[in-house]
Amino acid sequence: MPSNDCVQTLYSDHHGWLHAWLRSKLGNAADAADLAQDTFVRLLQRREQLQLNAPRAFLRTVARGLVIDHWRREELHRAYLEALAHVPEALAPSAETRELLLELLERIARMLDGLKPKVRRAFLLAQCEGLKHQAIAEQLGISVRTVERYIADALYHCYVLHYQDEC
Amino acid sequence: MTAARPDTKAVKQAIQWMLRLRESGHDLALQQQCAQWRSAHHEHEHAWQRVTHLHQNLDLRAIPGAGLALQTLETSQQRLRRRQALKLLGGVVMAGSASWLAKDLDAVSAWASDYATGTGERRVFTLPDGSLMQLNTRSAVDLAFIDRQRLVRLKHGELMITCNPRHPVFVQTRDVLLEGFEGRFVAYQDSDCTRVSVSRGKVAIHRPGIAQLQWIESGQNWRLDAHGAQRIAQMDMDAMAWTEGLIVTQNMRLADFLAQVSRYRHGYLGCSNEIADLRLSGVFRLEDPEQLLRLLPQTLPVRVHQRTRWWVRVESTT
């Protein structure tokens, strides 16, 4: 566990630089301030000792992950609203349901990060649309055996991520 | 305090059981077998609990409005990747740099143009960074460096590049600037466009003045020209087959087929209008195009009219 002092030093030495770096990525000072803050909060929560040989490279790595999370949230919102625009108003879900769904989608999208496109697609067709393996195989032009392997791989990938934070 | 983690093998078996049960609906025998497996060892049961818990967590179907989930996830993922590539990877792949790069390529003095093939020839070259380049018939490329970036300029013809994953490779054609990150792709400079097919990995399309990248994913085929980029859903010819010395067609128009064959031989090769739309599916060897033409009458109602060695016309037999 890093000591508060250590993070404090990091903060005073590099916060200004990190904010500027984030701002150049996000193009927005307020979001950059939020994410700079989040970056240091992340560091306080880490279990292992901080690697301080290259503090800026280290901060950038943590912040980069947060930028991607931030964009992912934005893009999910945007894509969901666009998709909703084609749904008749009477059928559109309530605001609370939307929030709930978006949270779930974000969790899933984060978990699926790093999967190959076809693996991801096979998994989502099963998970979102409830398609049978045969139907997925036809849609993706691959064998049923491959679909089974893809979905099992994706689930295992999610399993590892889901339970990784346990001691 | 939770019990120790179930081992990987038990987890993978639990996943298999869950998928099999989900797929089979209410198969009682299968359910019994699964129950037996679960009770055989406490670790099995533990893994089963965790997998089903996770699976419920990921189940979208019960939530109202989740019908849009797939579309939302896929659209946002594509855009996210574009943004990541533009803003975070740094290096040459930055907004605005594509047009800069394309414009400055001509000013580079270090072009070396000793990669070329003649009619009917195919050659494989190993580039200095370890990537492989194969040139198809009647092709020529130049090579250059800018800032340690490897650039290939396709002057005419067709190439396949197998990328070295540590060094992205840029390929400039008349129409577009491509960046291959990993895997293998083919680029063909046709008379009015550039055709790109990716068999593994992915390729980014840079277009002058357009900050957003477009991605060509593995298995996709695209047609790119000055007006835009268009994905081709159905190909009438395997874009990679030439690298193995073959033409592989799927319901291809005879006229288009002959246009392809004529790339590999000297002289005129054409057909009369009434048979231009006949369809051809098959695997043909490129090494002897004359032999290939002699085989045509065996599958189609045509005859090959050879006035001279350099003037060949395929005509109807009826």
Image (tube, coloured by chain):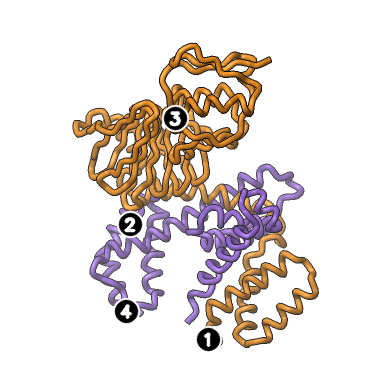
Chain colours: A purple, B orange
B91, B265: nearer the viewer: B265
Q: Residue at x 61, y 44 (%)?
A: A82
Q: Residues within 10 Å of mark 2 (few under 14, many from 20)?
A: many
Determine which residue is flagged by label 1: B4
For the residue labelled by badge 2, is the local secondary structure a helix, a strand or a loop? helix
State how far apart marks 3 and 2 are (Cα). 43 Å
Q: Nearer the viewer, mark 4 or mark 3?
A: 3
Q: For mark 4, does the 10 Å Cα neighbourhood hold few (<14), some (14 to 19), or many (20 or more) residues?
A: few
Residue type at tag 3 = Thr
Instruction: Please give the residue where the numbered disc 3 appears in the rendered image.
Output: B194
Same chain, marks 1 and 2?
no
Mark 1 or mark 2, whichever is nearer to me: 1
Q: What amino acid is at disc 2?
A: His
Q: Mark 2 falls within which chain? A: A
Nearer the camera: disc 4 or disc 1: 1
Q: Chain of mark 4?
A: A
Is A161 situated above or below A63? below
Image vertical order of residue B98 relative to residue B40, above or below: above
Contact between labelled residues 2 and 4, with CB atoms less than 8 Å apart: no
Q: Are marks 3 and 1 in contact (CB under 8 Å)?
A: no
Residue carrying label 4: A3
- Mark nearest the camera among 3 and 1 is 3
Q: Answer yes or no: do the residues labelled 4 and 1 have beta carbons within 8 Å?
A: no
Q: CA distance from mark 4 to mark 3?
A: 57 Å
**Label 4 in the same subunit as label 1:** no
Q: CA distance from mark 4 to mark 1?
A: 29 Å
Marks 4 and 2, how far apart at CA: 22 Å
Q: Earlier in the sequence, mark 4 or mark 2?
A: 4
- Which of marks 1 and 3 precedes in the sequence? 1
State the residue in front, A29 or B125: B125
Look at the image and tell me in which quarter the N terminus of chain B lies.
bottom right
